[in-house]
Image (cartoon, rainbow, N blue to C red):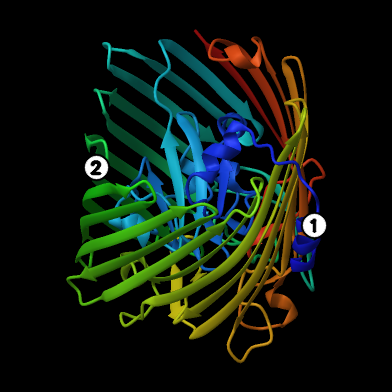
Amino acid sequence: MILAAAIALMIQVPDTLDASVVSAARRISPPVEKASREVLERSVSVADAIRDFSGVQLRDYGGAGGLKTVNVRSLGSAHTAIFMDGVPIDNAQNMQPDLGRLDTEDLETIELYTGQKSELLQSAREYGSANSLHLETAAPRGRKTTMRLRGGSFGTLSPVISHEGRLGNRLSGRLRMGYDHSQGQYLFHVSGASYDTTMTRENGDFKAFKASGGLWYTPEKGRYHLSARMYDSERGIPGPVYKQSKDYPMSLDRQADRSYSLQASGTQELTPRLKLLARARYSRDILEYLDISELDPSVSAQWNYDLQSTYLSTSLGWQVMPWLHLGAAVDAQHEALESKIDARRSTLFAAGSAAVLKDPWRASATLQYQATDDGYRFLSPAFLLDWHPRQDWQFGGVVKRSCRLPSFNDLYYTNVTSRTLLPEKVWQFSARWCWDRSYGPWHFRANEELYHNRVTDKLIAVPNGSLFRWSMYNIGKVKIWGDEIHAHVSWKKALGLTARYSFQWAREDGNTFQIPYISLHSASFNLFGAIDAFRLDIRGFLTGARLTAASTRPEYRLAPWTTWDASLSWHSACHSERSRGISLSLDLRNILNEQYQIVQGYPMPGINVLGTVAITL
């Protein structure tokens, strides 16, 4: 791959550059995967929108209500911080939101940064994450009302209505409500040494009501945003499939989630060279779990968890000189868990950064310090370097150290765990090249990134009977080597092909096999064609074999799988005027009816259909 980059450097490219490349060249550009508004319009949830990102393994437990989390570059889901408009969002179950319940209706973009985000005006919390997924809410554009109805296989029905508009010269707002429902029943094939049968996934029903509202105020030299969100759901937890006959009792467990959040952020230019950023968030997550014995349904246990979190952040960005930028930030967060075992944790984050922007070089260094009142202390340094030898070529690298503390989930939400779990420490090293070029109506992009992660005291989570019961343990040192390749070609906005390939070698010291649930090879493809108001997308996903435990025995091996999806959409207005009109889409998922599992014991649905109609007035 490095040889390919060297050969590509020998290609003579004219010294011309369009406006988009000029804009990108003026700041440090760390590795980032981005889902644009067009992608989000075709996605059911955040999990759906990011599933073909490079280096991403999406953990999906099946069905509309199945838990969905993201694992980036074999580091585990807890190493990917989720930010909504720059504010971290948590969840009472796993300290990372279920990405399946975060929809894309009011989002402008989704960006996944591996290593470090380069913006100097950011919160101290953002500096310390190994990976970060940023969800940016779209500000209202004019006055409009949108009604959308989505429905399809497995009794899925999802209506949404939203209204947005201006409330003054500088004030605008949006109000949105939605409902999700699914029966969650689907057929799947299961086989073993002494059985081969087709079963129906039971107790997978799901229903949720969600509402959100936001206000945007844009005074001179400033921008302020206030938002509130509410989510209330109730679902069945079907549990893992390890049955050998149709008569074996199925899981009857139930789970209810209620969450409320209020967050505010504001950016103000104090002087032409000094900017202030402040953010705050309060959230409350209530989880109720009914654990019902499969063999004796009259025996049950109720688990209740109430997690409240308060977060405050302030940041300063100072342009000392045109080529020198400095930043500083301080955050404070307090979390309180009420359950059978109460827990409290207060955390202080402090960070500083400096960037030198001197063509053709860009360099940035950051240092984050975090301390908790339960005794943890950690420094997280990072260094980013970019080199632009030509206007459409870019080379770069990242070195970073980060820490993942044992969460309340790890310590209290499991049936098999250790209260002396050690923090998980990570060193990240990466190097990349990128070529981005347009020739008339054609646009080409190719990039590759090689990376190496060194993990000490890696924390492993393994399902233990249901989605609610997990086993947590440290496995010592893990070394991860990876290579990600991304290629894209498009003609105008009418035809395009994107291909991604990931290689991940992830093993614990002393072992000759992969750590659980990490495939050696994975790839994705996206082909699209557009004619007038019609657009067709075909997406393919390929994942190699994986192990489910630290053993090479056949029963711990998950077979490789490949799925293909197709989506056809139509808009009543031209692309530039799509803020009004009618849009229709039809999605065919898993069109080859592949029988596969992403997590052992949790079969994924076969072929399924989803249709959407949206009217914007």
- Determine whether 400 is above or below 67 in the image: below
Q: Kindly indicate the quadrant of the structure image that contains residue 546.
A: bottom right
- Determine whether 304 is above or below 470 in the image: above
Amino acid type at circle 1 is Met
Residue 515 visible? The answer is yes
Q: Kindly indicate the quadrant of the structure image that contains residue 64.
A: top right
**Residue 515 spot, x, y in % from top left:** 61, 77
The residue to which callout 2 is attached is 274
The residue to which callout 1 is attached is 10
- Determine whether 476 is above or below 255 in the image: below
Could you tell me which secondary element the residue under label 1 belongs to?
A: loop
**Residue 612 spot, x, y in % from top left:** 62, 23
Residue 188 falls left or right of residue 312: right
**Residue 259 spot, x, y in % from top left:** 31, 43
Residue at (49% x, 78% y) in the render: 455
Q: Considering depth in this image, is 508 or 590 the residue closer to the camera?
A: 508
**Residue 413 spot, x, y in % from top left:** 35, 66
**Number of the front mark, 1 or 2:** 1
